[in-house]
Amino acid sequence: MSDSIDFGIVPTTASLERLIELYGGQGLRIPPYQRGYEWNARNIQRFVDTLREEFKKRKGGSNPIFLGPIQISEERSKEGSVTASIVDGRQRLTTLALLEAFLVGKGEERNGGSVASLLSEQDDPKLASTIKALERGQIEPFTTLSEWNPSVLRLTRKGKKAADACEDIYERNARFIVTIFKNKIDGAEGLLDYLKQNVFFIVVAVKNRDLTSIIKIFDSMNSTGQPLSDEAMFKLRLYAHVRSFEGDREPSEIMQHINGTYELVEDYNKSHGTTISMSDVLWGFRLYCVAIK
């Protein structure tokens, strides 16, 4: 039996700098099935603390930091153009983009491309506006850590009234990054260049595979992140199924329609005081399919 089986998977080790060179030009698209940016204060604190501790230990030399795998799906169109989408790694890359923007706002030189160029601006306009605000020094720190409460927080920027400020996870996390470095920025000179050269990922490029295969690969690699629930898996497979026979339909429209179905269950629970989950609905649907066979 031959050992040379082509799974369409191309793994490589790449620094953050190299990752920007590979994908910064076109940007990584955020597919409709991708979960949103969800990191909270604890995630940010641990992530930034890890980077700062490794930076302090460098002692004039390199000290590589491994930040896990990045999974990318590459799809070639009939015309030959390649679209790259991020399957796993959005949380880390988004946080690195916010951190980079903060450091630039504090006077760090951005040599080469930006981390933000890895994330498609058209898919994430809120991130783009937050990055610009950080680079201009327009994001204020929290006055106390007890302010970190996403349900009640109203972000205030310099030159903006509180009533005009918006509540947004990108801006909340940007504000938390500013808070972490408050009065401690003096020891961070050169941090941006250090991160670009010494942060490494295993980049797993999955080429021309269907969504079900892509998700299976993600699930097999996902040893530290949030696992996919049965509901999420059903949503992804339903999305792939609809796309298989409605290829001309916009992917975002398909996902919006599916999400709307999930929201119907949530709305029903709110109006009737029930706690029906999508798992309950899917179990009932399974019994129905068995009964009509």
Image (spheres, grey):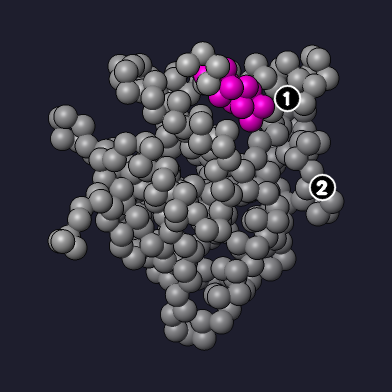
Query: Which amino acid lies under the numbered mark 2 shown in the image of this protein?
Result: Glu
54, above or below 222, in the image: below
Q: Which residues are magenta?
A: 278-289
Task: Describe the element under mark 1 as helix, strand or loop.
Answer: loop
What quarter of the picture does the N terminus occupy?
bottom left
**Numbered badge on residue 234:** none
Q: What is the CA distance from the residue labelled 1 to the residue labelled 2?
A: 33 Å
Residue marked by disc 1: 276
Verify whether residue 227 appears in magenta: no
Picture quadrant where residue 284 is located: top right
Verify whether residue 285 appears in magenta: yes
Q: Nearer the viewer, residue 52 or 269?
A: 269
Q: Earlier in the sequence, mark 1 or mark 2?
A: 2
Magenta residues: mostly which secondary structure? helix
Residue at image coords 79%, 14%? 271
- Please state if 134 lies on the left or on the right of 247 as rendered: right
Q: Nearer the viewer, mark 1 or mark 2?
A: 1
Residue marked by disc 2: 147
Picture quadrant where residue 158 is located: top right
Task: Describe the element under mark 2 as helix, strand or loop.
Answer: helix
- Please state if 239 lies on the left or on the right of 152 as rendered: left
Query: Which amino acid lies under the numbered mark 1 shown in the image of this protein?
Result: Ile
Residue at image coords 44%, 53%? 220
Q: Position of residue 127 (x, y in %)?
A: 53, 39
Residue at image coords 48%, 71%? 65
The crowd level at tag 2 (other Cα within 10 Å; few <14, some 14-19, many 20+) is few
Q: Position of residue 196 (x, y in %)?
A: 42, 64
